[in-house]
Image (cartoon, rainbow, N blue to C red):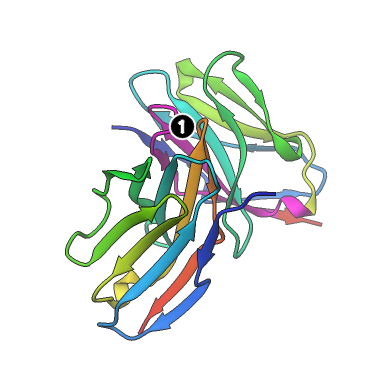
Amino acid sequence: DARVTQTPRHKVTEMGQEVTMRCQPILGHNTVFWYRQTMMQGLELLAYFRNRAPLDDSGMPKDRFSAEMPDATLATLKIQPSEPRDSAVYFCASGTVGTQYFGPGTRLLVL
Amino acid sequence: AQSVTQPDIHITVSEGASLELRCNYSYGATPYLFWYVQSPGQGLQLLLKYFSGDTLVQGIKGFEAEFKRSQSSFNLRKPSVHWSDAAEYFCAVGAKRDDKIIFGKGTRLHILP
């Protein structure tokens, strides 16, 4: 049963530190999405890729967030420097034929 | 721009009772519509989707949804809920297949024994 995997599952860090979250999409899926979920804002799309090319990152704070797909098996989301307001659950999803499959998320706490 | 409204933040039903969760969307053309479910501490799982064709869509876990263009709605239904259905439910809309989708704020479902 193919699944999207995300690491780490939990991360606690201090303000100003760099945070890197990783996602392994399902093999063969050509789209990858990054979402952030908070109580206040709900699910927000941060960025997404098709065939490893970035299509839209308008939901991402450009000054501190960056998303990349160095290869078809890895997507990364980096925050540098991190701030307390970045505390949230970050989900990766990969998609094919109109369906997105979500990973379990990375729960980030920035102190 | 697309948008999704889920008017009910919380809904409580008794086990065995029927369920309807409301979803209204805003989009000029025929939308791609989805319902996802999220259990506590988990990612989202697709329940069902509508792209075209029959406006009554069957999904997993006994759920169904009906697309009503005239009302811009895509309500989720289940004839008899089980305690394991307690979760948060998200409606979502997209403009193109395999493109980004916009999620509603979610409806948290509580089940009374």
Q: Residue at x 43, y 82 (%)?
A: A12
Q: Is residue B45 visible?
A: yes
Q: Is residue B105 magenta?
A: yes
- Mark 1: secondary structure: strand
Q: Position of residue B73 (x, y in %)?
A: 50, 26
The image quarter containing residue B54 is top right
Quadrant where the C terminus of chain A sits is bottom left
Question: In this figure, which residue is indicated by the disc labeled 1?
Answer: B24
Magenta-tinted stretch: B84-110
Q: Is residue A64 left or right of residue B32?
A: left
Count of numbered badges drawn on the protein = 1
Q: Is residue A43 visible?
A: no
Q: Position of residue A13 (x, y in %)?
A: 38, 83
Q: Residue at x 27, y 44 (%)?
A: A56
Q: Position of residue B8 (x, y in %)?
A: 52, 45
Q: Is residue A110 left or right of residue B83?
A: left
Q: Position of residue A27 (x, y in %)?
A: 55, 46
Question: Which chain is indicated by disc 1?
Answer: B
Residue A92 vs B49, above or below: the answer is: below
Nearest the viewer among B36 and A78 is A78
Q: Amino acid at mark 1?
A: Asn
Residue A32 vs B98, above or below: the answer is: below
Q: Residue at x 57, y 13 (%)?
A: B53
Q: Is residue B54 magenta?
A: no
Within 10 Å of disc 1 (Cα), the crowding (few <14, some 14-19, many 20+) is many
Nearest the viewer among B35 and A26 is A26
Q: Is residue A23 left or right of residue B14?
A: left
